[in-house]
Amino acid sequence: MSEPIVLGIESTCDETAAAIVQGRTLLSNVVASSMEEHARYGGVIPEIASRAHAEAFVPCVSKALADANMTLADVDAIAVSAGPGLAGCLAVGVSGAKALAWAANKPIYGINHVIGHIAVTQLQFGAFPPDTLALIVSGGHTSLLHVEDMPRKIDVVGTTLDDAAGECFDKVARLLGFPYPGGPHIDHHAQNGDPHAIKVPMGLTQGKAGAAHPYDFSFSGVKTAVARWVEGEQAAGHEIPVDDVCASLADSVATVLARKAMKGCEQYDSKTLIVGGGFSANSQLRTKLLEYGEKCGVEVRIPRIKLCTDNGAMVAMLGVNLVEAGVAPSAPDFPIDSAMPLTKVSM
Ligand code: KG4
Ligand code: ZN
């Protein structure tokens, strides 16, 4: 098989998505989001998201096939996010994908959504160099991975001990009165603020804790410090300089991520840093990583924004990697795994 064609299906959270990838070429990419239905509740309501997946599944898959000028018979395999994610949401995508695989007699891969976030960079930058480092920054994960051999051997070098970067942004955003998801609002306001206006701690970078956790992250202290400062100002009757708060928070988080990622590249002798996950859409992080990468002689591969947020292309791309590597498909009755570990690439 020269260039495998894979249909990728995504339904871990609030995006229903389907895409077709052939080799390293994206042939179609369809995303339907239920985000607006959750905004007024301040977070994703699993029951609403699951129903939205059930409604969007067939239209998304049909459009992905049509846009690629294909039918199900043309694909070599089907890949679907099996975890981590919301159980009810995963169940919709996985059940649908299993039905398609059974009906068309195609192999199916239940893949790890988070690993998909880094796999997708190949559509823009080509295959992974062997023995490379990857930074994953999504809503639920902040981790540094050692990708020894994609997709066969991936190890966790460091991870967040509490909140993920995206979570931290979303929580501070809520405090500042922005609708869900707040991350993009913080990004927007930070662009007009002074990143040094407020002193925001940089978790696990100094002293004993920093030495004990050189590659781990902690963002809950950052969130608390910003919350305390805002509450103090409010109590004193001062107006909150929202842009400055956002800029200071974003600068602290981006600096910690960039510093630790570069330190990891040095330790593992990696000249490339792969970056993925919804939070990699953050402009302060993108700028900081590219700046640090240039200084340290590391090529930073951050995908274009459309590939950062949840999509089907990331699932299809990882599916192609699994097919190319000769990894056995998942059993037809494979389960979902809402807490799928990062070291497990497929079911
Ligand atoms: O990877 P993702 O789409 O969902 C998960 O798999 O978790 O990541 C969503 C996260 C949310 O926390 C959202 O606020 C954050 O990514 N995010 C951003 C930006 N765009 C998305 N955070 C900061 N700046 C952005 N531009
Ligand atoms: Zn994601």
Image (cartoon, rainbow, N blue to C red):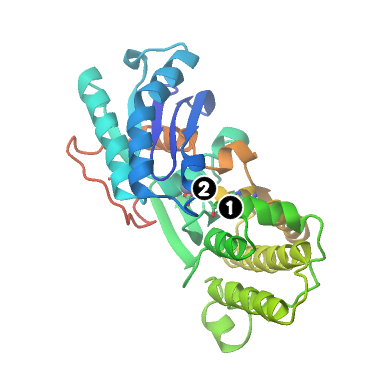
Query: The disc labelled 2 sits on which kind of residue?
Result: Ala
Q: How many marks?
A: 2
Taking depth in this image into account, of 264 and 237 the one nearest to the observer is 237
Give the mark, 1 or 2, whose residue is nearer the N terminus.
Answer: 2
Asked whether residue 299 appears in the rendered view, the answer is yes
Image quadrant in which you'd find residue 53 = top left
Q: Quadrant of the N terminus?
A: top left
Seen at 57% across and 43% down, the residue is 308
Instruction: Give the x, y percent position of residue 207.
Output: 61, 88
Q: Quadrant of the C terminus?
A: top left
Residue toward you, 232 or 217: 232
Q: Secondary structure at mark 2?
A: helix
Q: Mark 1 CB in 8 Å range of ligand 1?
A: no
* Amino acid type indicated by mark 1: Pro
Q: Residue at the spot x=38%, y=42% of the render?
A: 49
Residue at x 77%, y 55% (from the top left corner): 294
**Res 226 label:** none
Q: Which mark is residue 179?
A: 1
Instruction: Between residue 111 and residue 329, name the one nearer to us.
Output: 111
In this figure, which residue is indicated by the disc labeled 2?
Answer: 39
Q: Is residue 211 above or below residue 156?
A: below
Residue 15 in the figure: left or right of residue 242 = left
User: Which type of secondary structure does the marked residue at label 1 adopt?
Assistant: loop
Assess disc 1: are there few (<14), some (14-19) or many (≥20) residues with their C-alpha within 10 Å of its C-alpha.
Answer: many
User: Cβ–Cβ below 8 Å for labels 1 and 2?
Assistant: yes
Instruction: Please indicate, yes or no, whether residue 133 appears anywhere in the rendered image.
Output: no
Residue 170 x/y as whole percent: 56, 59
Mark 2 Cα shell of 10 Å, populated few (<14), some (14-19), many (≥20): some
Residue 183 horizontal/vertical position (percent): 61, 54
Q: Is residue 49 above or below residue 43?
A: above
